[in-house]
Image (spheres, rainbow, N blue to C red):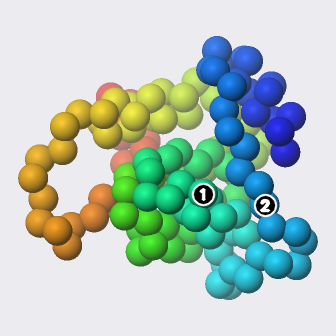
């Protein structure tokens, strides 16, 4: 799994990034329709903000993350036929800029929700 970060990070000019360890095959115990990486990413994030870029993210993953992760998280699905594009990078950059701004005071029961595809498109066009 580490080879993807080496190639991607160097292409994007990013520093060395951590790699999440995955459970051995057959030990992923995920609810139906949820990606096998979802639970492990949320556990690894441990309440920190994170961005997950993948070509297999679904609404089931977004809903599970919103219910189980109480910090901002962007689950960004890329088109597997096109790969990571400039529009994807722009969407991720816009989200990162948004979450780096000070948050207004919120009710303790309010949690940030992941962006859906329409919101991501709107950010990408901004």
Image coordinates for residue 20, horizontal then vertical, percent: 71, 51
Q: Quadrant of residue 17?
A: top right
Residue ID at (84%, 45%):
1
Find the distance from the CA under tag 2 to the CA under tag 1.
10 Å
Q: Quadrant of residue 103?
A: top left
- The kind of secondary structure element at disc 1 is helix
Q: Nearer the viewer, residue 88 or 19?
A: 19
**Disc ID at residue 22:** 2
Image coordinates for residue 90, horizontal then vertical, percent: 48, 27
Relative to 19, 76 lies left or right = left
**Disc ID at residue 44:** 1
Image coordinates for residue 25, horizontal then vertical, percent: 90, 71
Image coordinates for residue 3, horizontal then vertical, percent: 86, 34
Q: Is residue 90 above or below residue 102?
A: above
Residue ID at (83%, 39%):
2
Residue ID at (53%, 55%):
45
- The kind of secondary structure element at disc 2 is loop
Residue ID at (68%, 39%):
18
Q: Is residue 95 above or below residue 68?
A: above
């Amino acid at each position: 799994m580490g080879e993807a970060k080496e190639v991607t990070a160097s292409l994007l000019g990013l520093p060395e990034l951590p790699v999440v360890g995955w459970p051995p095959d057959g030990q992923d115990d995920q609810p139906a329709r949820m990606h096998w990486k979802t639970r492990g990413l949320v556990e690894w994030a441990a309440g920190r903000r994170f961005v997950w870029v993948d070509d297999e993210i679904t609404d089931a993953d977004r809903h599970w993350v919103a219910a189980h992760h109480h910090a901002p998280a962007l689950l960004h699905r890329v088109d597997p036929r096109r790969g990571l594009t400039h529009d994807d990078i722009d969407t991720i950059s816009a989200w990162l800029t948004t979450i780096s701004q000070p948050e207004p005071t919120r009710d303790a029961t309010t949690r940030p929700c992941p962006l859906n595809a329409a919101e991501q498109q709107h950010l990408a066009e901004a």
